[in-house]
Image (spheres, grey):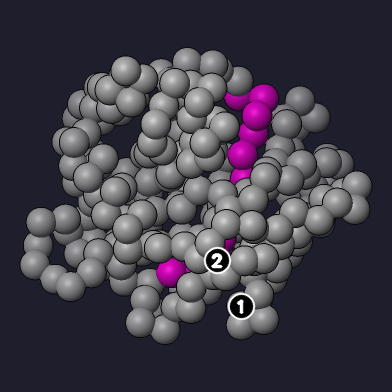
Amino acid sequence: MSDAIAAQNLHELMKSWSGASPYAWKVAINGERGQRRLGLTHFVIAPLRERIHLTSGIDVEFAPAQKICVEAEVLVRIARDDGETGESLIEAVAPCLEIVDYALGGTSLRELLAHSFFHAGIVPGKFIPAAEWRTLRAPYPRAQDDQGNTHARESADDDLTELIGEVAALARAAGAPLRRGQLVLSGSYIEPLPLRLGTTVEVDYGPELPKLSVGRTS
């Protein structure tokens, strides 16, 4: 039932945008535990309107009340409008950190969708053409939190083609099909990492990709 409610809420939100397309979409609630808590059986997607892109290695000032965490994801650039002929919807892929602010709160799907599931910005890496992208393999992405605990991916290899196909279906159902050049955040591969005052989160994406990092000055 909650899957239908999530789809209805997304459809209503996109109608309120009066035909405007988001610059990006994000996959949210992609873990089974979060899905069970909300009564879902599938991930949901949320549109992103405001483009907040940060450079890897930067130190960012946040308000003291903000509960900032970092999620290790990948960013997919869409190759063509959904519905146009073509072999793949994926043009290029980049490692990417998503900044989230859990102080935004909310417990219902409608409340969470309103702020795009805590979204506060991204730290994108360099895009790699889809034909050259190497599938991320466990234990990557991998990172240490500020307590020295290691967080590493445990699941099997990702299938971005399947993921983007599912995102396309959800966006289409919401009346806002994917467009060429739009971006899609994959959802986090590991637990969110707290970004506290005076700390830096650095994520290792494996030997073939550069590490990404972001710090907090307040």
Q: Please identify the dominant SS of the magenta region.
A: strand
Q: Residues within 10 Å of mark 2 (few under 14, many from 20)?
A: many
- x, y percentage for residue 68? 71, 38
The answer to whether 3 is drawn above or below residue 83 in the figure is above
The quadrant the N terminus occupies is top left
- x, y percentage for residue 102? 65, 29
205 lies left or right of 34: right
The disc at residue 49 is none
Please name the residue shown 46% across and 53% down the image: 186
Q: Which residue in the structure is indicated by mark 2?
A: 95
Q: Residues within 10 Å of mark 1 (few under 14, many from 20)?
A: some
Total numbered labels = 2
129 lies left or right of 123: left
Is residue 115 among what the camera can see? no
- Three-letter amino acid code at disc 2? Pro
- Three-letter amino acid code at disc 1? Leu
Please name the residue shown 54% across and 16% down the image: 107
Badge 2 or badge 1: first in the primary sequence = 2
SS of the residue under disc 1? loop
117 lies left or right of 139: left
Q: Which residue in the structure is indicated by mark 1?
A: 209
**Magenta segment:** 93-104
35 lies left or right of 143: left
Please name the residue shown 21% across and 34% down the image: 174
Q: Do the residues labelled 2 and 1 touch (CB within 8 Å)?
A: yes
Q: Does the magenta stretch include residue 213?
A: no
The answer to whether 162 is drawn above or below residue 130 in the figure is above
- Gap between marks 2 and 1, in whole Å? 8 Å
SS of the residue under disc 2? strand
